[in-house]
Image: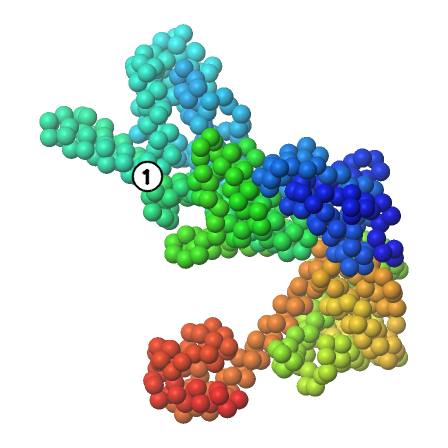
Amino acid sequence: MASTVAWRPRAGDIPNQPGVYRFTDDNKRVLYVGKAKNLRARLSNYFAPLATLHERTRRMVLSASNVEWTIVGNDFEALQLEYTWIKEFDPPFNVQYKDDKSYPYLAITMGDEVPRVLVTRNRNLPNARYFGPYSRAWAIRDTVDVLLKAFPMRSCSTSVYKRAQQTGRPCLLGDIGKCAAPCVGRVSKEDHKSIALDFASFMAGNDSRMLDSIRVKMTDAAGEQDYESAARYRDQIGAMETALAKNQIVLSEDVDADFFGIAHDELAAAVQQFIVRGGRIRGVRGWVVDKELDVELGGLVESVLQNAYDDTSPPRDVLVPALPDDSTALEEWLAQRRGLGARVRLRVAQRGEKAALAQTVETNAKNALMLYKSKRSGDFVARSQALADIQEALGMAEAPLRMECFDVSHLSGTNVVASMVVFEDGLPKKQHYRRFNIAETTDDTDSIYQVLKRRLAYLAAGDAVPTAAEVEEAAMLTESSRAAGDTARSAAESGEVPAPPSKFAYPPQLLIVDGGQPQVNAAQRALEESGVSGIQLAGIAKRLEEIWLPNSDYPVILPRNSDALFLIQRLRDEAHRFAITHQRQRRSKDISSVLSTVPGLGPSRIKALLQHFGSVARLKAASAEQMSEVPGIGETTAAAIIEKLGQR
């Protein structure tokens, strides 16, 4: 592999000033847009030796044939120009936004002579005030229906309004008190606009002030024995309180902020945005981001905010999981989107109620990412395509209908365990999962070798491995035997049909290890020594997500957003999860056996201790006073626990 690309510009030609750069291909298509405080220092990273570049960066550089740059005055101007170019050119190697559906908003058309309230996905209504977005259209429609009792303003279409003007008869909403009926002159246009302004003020978060004002009016009307007006005010208060009950109070009433949560892995990121106005959650928005190049969380935050406020104005406070490097320039850009003279603070919630809400948003983002991945893996067409792509990429004779993945986990070289997970037809076969305890090992490669030797012993050369057709026939017979007695078992014992193979003996078409070339070589040595043939071996290295094959100098690179890579990653992640779970269970049993020797410490108190501290490490670091907080643990017992743990 060449040290770098031939079209690399001379370092002396690149300015060391702030600017924005564009990578283009032979057809002048823009592949990637980025910004830098120092163009020369930033671009030199792309022209490092190709072998040292991240695989996605290397692929972008090899796809490009030229790089252009534009010098700007400062970081803020660089941010503005980068945003403009990304929107204009839609570069394939920049962060791509998917599933970013159009969310419903509540709009009040204050620019109209007779303002109207409506639920819409159109963000281009002239002089309209928008509230939202909301995750469910029906939810905001219910809220509007309730609030029309308190603020009876027009919600009908233009044609309905004109027809009422012509006939002199209001629509049904006017008859039931959910519209003040300006169409027939029951209120003046000026009074109706005042109602619309009150509606907008209430939605903007001034709910407590308005409720207090109406309560005073109700009390005054009752004192003057104007019971009809008092009842009307009472109904308004009830409608407003019903609407407010739909929005959970999460913060103090003076808080106007947007909270962003991001959960991401190597391929994608799920974003959740909670819109808080007047201390209440007024809207929730979520979308999925495809990551082409390797983007750190701070850089991802910057891209997410640019997308989120592309067509809307940010609030005073924007809370994010991490600050980007150029947060000051980003704050300036957000302030510009907010309006002349406005300020926007970009920060990370550290403690208190805002940190608690930020944690909730992040939890929602993690759940959204999990659902996205589950939906993707549950697509039969996508799974079939993934298996076909893996077959082609690895040069296999047939698609790997059964795949096994192995991972090793340890704690500073101790408690070494390994896991085997099985996927059949692209889906996990959890009843075939296996765990391994490894007594002595020198390193990860030796652990991989030991585990594979033990697993492949069941498939040693000369063993009668049943064909797929025989396995299917035996499995069907086994199922029927549950309803028909012991017929199938007798047939299997007499040799009429083959008995179904053990879950551990059924051979995979593809065997995957978590790791790069060293781990693959160790697995290949175990495979050769076992004498088993007909199994493809591969390894997936986490840093660059490349696939390594035995006796290969270069890895196989699967497209970053391909279903094939997604499936292999899911296998690797499942093996890692299964291994970690086993190791934690072993450590828990180990510490439980040690604690059981402490006088007065039984199983229930040991369980309470572990649940209270959450981990063995926290338990070991706890003081006697902290242990005494656990019910049933006195000072004497706590001191004995500390002494026993110190002897380990």
Quarter holding the N terminus is bottom right
Residue sitting farthest toward the top: 166
> Measured from the top left, where is residue 147 in percent x and y?
35, 31
Question: Can residue 279 be seen from the camera position used here?
Answer: yes
> Measured from the top left, where is residue 87 in percent x and y?
65, 34
Residue at coordinates 47% horizontally, 55% vertically from top-left? Answer: 359
**Which residue is denoted by mark 1 in the rendering?**
242
Report the number of numbered marks: 1
> Measured from the top left, where is residue 342 in percent x and y?
44, 35
Q: Is residue 8 left or right of residue 338?
A: right
Coloration of the structure image: rainbow
Write down the quadrant of residue 551 in the picture: bottom right
Looking at the picture, does residue 608 appear above or below residue 404? below
Looking at the picture, does residue 235 appear above or below residue 58? above
- Which amino acid type is marked by label 1? Thr
Write down the quadrant of residue 310 in the picture: top right
The one nearer the camera, 39 or 435, is: 39
Residue at coordinates 65% horizontally, 68% vertically from top-left? Answer: 576
Residue sitting farthest toward the front: 12
The one nearer the camera, 137 or 449, is: 449
SS class of the residue under badge 1?
helix
> Measured from the top left, where is residue 414 in percent x and y?
63, 82
Residue at coordinates 70% horizontally, 71% vertically from top-left? Answer: 407
Circle 1 crowding by C-alpha within 10 Å: few under 14, some 14–19, many from 20: some
